[in-house]
Image (cartoon, coloured by chain):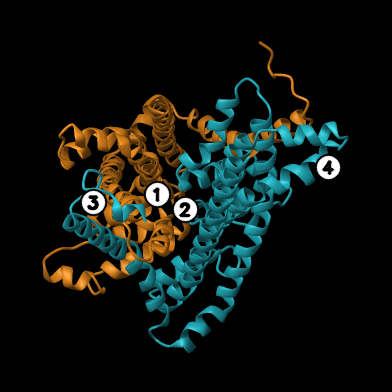
Amino acid sequence: MKFKQHSVLPGFNLSLGYSMLYLSLIVLLPLAALISKSLGLSWAQFWATVSEPRVVATYQVTFGASLLAALINLFVGLLIAWVLVRYPFPGKRFIDALVDLPFALPTAVAGIALATLYAPNGLLGEPLEKLGIKIAFTPAGIVLALTFITLPFVVRTVQPVLEDMERELEEAASSLGATRWQIFSQVILPTIFPALLTGFTLAFARAIGEFGSVIFIAGNMPFKSEITPLMIISKLEQYDYLGATAIAVVMLLVSFALLLLINGLQWWMAKRLGRRK
Amino acid sequence: MATTTRSLATTEAPWIRYTLTTLALALITLLLIVPLLSVFYEALHQGWQLYQDSLLESDALAAIKLTLIVAAISLPLNLVFGVAAAWAIAKFDFKGKSILITLIDLPFAVSPVVAGLIYVLLFGAHGWWGPWLAEHDIKIIFAVPGIVLATVFVTFPFVARELIPLMEAQGSEEEQAALVLGASGWQTFWHVTLPNIKWGLLYGVILANARAMGEFGAVSVVSGHIRGMTNTIPLHVEILYNEYNFVGAFACASILALLALATLAIKSYIEWRTEQQAAEDRKHATEE
């Protein structure tokens, strides 16, 4: 097979060449610099840096909080998508648009707003404190910030699938005697499952790398509420470039693995939905 | 509406519908609306005068100016790339296309902090080209070029991502017709392709702009936080907040919140337009 199929349209060499050059300069070369810098470390040094107890504690906090936030959004996102697609209510267009707020609102703004709201003297933090619940400056605050930041993912992956679902399937199930709950759990849920899983993974991947919204509310106490991206920053502030690089490589590998997983999930989703049509 | 006449076979009992709707709206209020409103409340609750003074203070103005400059440089760069990449990917078939698409998405998968770090490793004092840059007195890290680079990285995929599926769906019959009628490649692009993709282009640019003006993590690593010099609005917000100047921090944050609301409004408008257009196209198709 030839590299390129014949086409009458011009500009292939120019557009592909420019895209490749720009991609290489902005994305690939800097990422290569990171990998090459990390090769300056011996395996033992690398391992010692990334398995330092304080760093390991940040993995636990980051992964735990991200997993929890993605799980919360699995349910919240499904509920919001369901209500937006299936039930009429006033102001629906406005609410639908508002769901994307976390994508449009700068993370630092979300961070200071949540930290102020849920601080012990804040509008919501004060009543919660009386109930004995502390959110700001604890790991719960991290989960809250990550839940905010990743809220749109599940909604936006599930919503179009729910919209395209054929009612005939539900009618058929109903005429065969299925209850509404059976229809939901055995007809609707399997259809939207790949979308749910994709949204969940996208939310998790985003939460792992999140920085701006978290640092204001986390309190950043070593071994308790420090996230991994913060570790990179604090190593950099101590001019420990190799240490920062080693941790960044770990994060990069996790990101790549999640990216591959997401691509696989989307392929699976397209295949499943395509087969149904 | 179809939803009100639907039989119980494909919907739930009214009490379930009301409960679920109320629950969803309550969650949206608590998670999204309350934090958004609190930004404006915190900014304004000590009076308009203080709000105005906080925004007109020289470091705040410098931050606003820098944010606008950074967006004005990084957006056109990614716009040109997005159009070029979409042209190559959507209009031609070549080997390795899906790898290229994955690579374009890469910056979205990388943590913002790592995005900042990679430029420090290239251009920082201890980086690959650090010594050479120092010799020639060129400052990239802890200066405006570094902030621009980090911003370009985090907003890299937006335009390309919006245009690739759009241009793939449109096919290339119209371009082929223009070429057969004797138009040059550039004429075809300006008069045929560009009008077809302008709304998708705007959509991508609007989203990229929101991210460019609001980016925190990546920019924070390369900026050096020099007041009045290398602070964008989000970094200025952080400094004010950490100095317990809450009114100042929330005043600057409120500009960004307004930007977010404007972004959502324009985004919804474009989506609404696209839907109208699609409905009209379907109508024409059935009439024919």
User: How far is mark 1 from mark 4, CA to CA?
Assistant: 44 Å
Tell me the element at label 2.
helix
Name the side, left or right, on which A47 lies relative to B255. left
- As drawn, the residue found furthest toward the front would be B287
Chain bearing tag 2 is B
What kind of residue is marked 2?
A: Gly
Which secondary structure, mark 1? loop
| Front disc: 4 or 2 | 4
In the rendered image, residue A194, in percent from the top left (x then y), is placed at 34, 33
Work out which residue is located at the far left of the displayed protein and give it. Answer: A131
On screen, residue B164 versus residue B196, left or right, reads: left
Chain A, hue in figure? orange
Q: Please tell me the numbered disc located at residue B217.
A: 2
Identify which amino acid the numbered label 1 is placed on: Glu
Quarter holding residue A248 = top left
Disc 1 marks which residue? A210
- Identify the amino acid type marked 3: Lys
Observer-nearest of A186 and B13: B13
Q: Chain of mark 4?
A: B
Image coords of residue A114 (percent x, y) = 32, 65
In the displayed structure, does residue B201 sit left or right of residue A177?
right
